Amino acid sequence: MEIKEEKETKLASAKLGYGFYNIIGGQRLAAVRKLSVINPATGKELATVPDIDRDGLERAISAAREAFPTWGSTPYRARKTVLIEMVHVIEQHMEELSALLTSEHGHPAASAKWEIEWLTKLYGPALHQMDLPDEKSEMGQVGHVVKRYLPLGVVCAISPWNLPVLLSFVKVLPALLTGNTVVLKPSPFTPLTVLRIADYVNKLLPPGVLNVVTGGDDLGQWMTSHPAFDKISFTGSTRIGKEILKSAAATLKHVTLELGGNDAGIVLPDAQPEKIAEALFWSMYLLNGQACVGLKRLYVHEDLYADLAGTLIAYARQIKTGDGFESESALGPIQNRAQYDRLRSTLAEIEKSGTGILYRGEIPQGTNGFFFPVILLDNPPDDAPFVREEAFGPIRSLLKYKDVDEAIDRANNSSYGLGASVWGQDAEKADAVARRLQAGTVWINQHANLHPNLPFNGFKDSGLGVEFGREGLEAFCKIQIVARK
Ligand code: NAD
């Protein structure tokens, strides 16, 4: 066993003045092996976190299993009270947590705050409406029927680096609310804010109810193939999602997969470029293009193309990319070096292809940060790899179309189906286009605006199952029918 307990509150991680621990069975645990977490704005190490081994994982799973019978039978209302308190505790530490998130993720300060406030200001209040009461009915010859939603057991939650806090806790909160216990693994690129929150809320929960472990991708693999988990809730890439589904088959686990996206938007001929340019820009470049539901392919009617391109570029010129702690920075760095290198080779491929670049933003010079310019492509071919594949960074395509049917076909010609959007003044016409788009969520005159009470799911290779809304809660439950004569 390479794990040791930590009794002191302030240790290690000199730059931040405190250490980062795994939370297992209610205790803070450190490991001999460490993972280095890099500040993407400087390229320098920010802190280290435990890189736990299989014994550490076994300990976390046992703690979650032991905690399950009591937590699972705790009244729903009592569990909800604890979770609301958890959200309050996060809120109380907002300033510190959002600064930590900027340091590890690169998010500019306002954007990091938005991510955490999505939990405290949207998810917290929405928790009040999240109920799954027993449903009673009379069913003819079957008699008096009660339908109950029972917890599944122990949930394995795995999250990515692009919205590390939000995407971790939108798994943890509904899983715990419905009576499950959890072992959460955040991305090795962005574990710090999640570990800090876990440390703060640990005292509110019985030991073992929420365990947070850190390690590399191999830890994720050990988790998803482990027979003791009852459910895997995964957000990440389509490639890894497919691997997870395979490894979960052996033990027939429940699985929810929120995967990649290559969202299309269609600007209808009646749209007014100057009215939508700002919203379009942020739909395309939010999180510096590192969003699963970012608008990645924008189909624009040929009559509006030049006007819209000009308006978008004029807006883009005002947007500064830089260190998230500098107040003028509206976009930060790319979150990690691997993603940065991928984007650089995509850009080299674009330049080699001869595709026109409508706009190339500026980035800070002379730093070791992973800064990448905002890029807007001029009508590249739909089948170019950099249009077909999800561009997880600030490279976006403006694509010209002649008629709306053609735009719909081209938008749907993708292996992904996470989100889509329609932009136009006539609500009925926009809705008629929306219903023909193959995506789990279609927005009109907006994009990527999610709500905890609205089910969110991906069509095609973008996922399996549902998060958020009543359906998202049900996904953490098994149904039991009791029929009495
Ligand atoms: P990723 O798939 O590389 O990693 C996600 C998580 O899985 C990380 O915690 C990683 O350590 C873990 N992991 C890696 N290999 C594993 C394995 N074999 N078994 C189990 N776990 C493993 O994704 P990423 O690069 O962190 O995130 C970017 C991707 O996530 C993009 O494709 C993006 O579209 C997608 N994403 C989807 C949504 C959504 O809601 N649909 C939201 C955000 C991000």
Image (cartoon, helix red, strand yellow):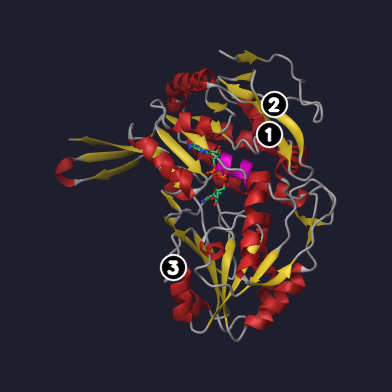
In the rendered view, does 481 fall on the left or right side of 96?
left
Q: Which residues are magenta?
A: 162-170
Task: Identify the element where label 2 is drawn.
Answer: loop
Picture quadrant where residue 241 is located: top left
Q: Is 214 or 474 nearer to us in this picture? A: 214
Amino acid type, label 3: Asn
Amino acid type, label 2: Phe
Residue projecting furthest to the front: 352
Q: Report the disc number at residue 192.
A: 1
Question: Is 455 drawn above or below residue 189 in the view shown?
Answer: below
- Whichever of labels 1 and 2 marks the residue nearer the N terminus, that label is 2
Amino acid type, label 1: Leu
Task: Identify the element where label 3 is drawn.
Answer: loop
In space, the residues marked 1 and 2 are separated at their CA atoms by 7 Å
Q: Is residue 165 magenta?
A: yes
Q: Which residue is mark 3?
A: 413
Give the image location of residue 106, x and y in percent: 73, 46
Label 2 beta carbon less than 8 Å to ligand 1: no
Q: Report the disc number at residue 348.
A: none
- Whichever of labels 3 and 1 marks the residue nearer the N terminus, that label is 1
- The local crowd at label 3, few if under 14, some if 14 to 19, many if 20 or more residues have their Cα within 10 Å, is some
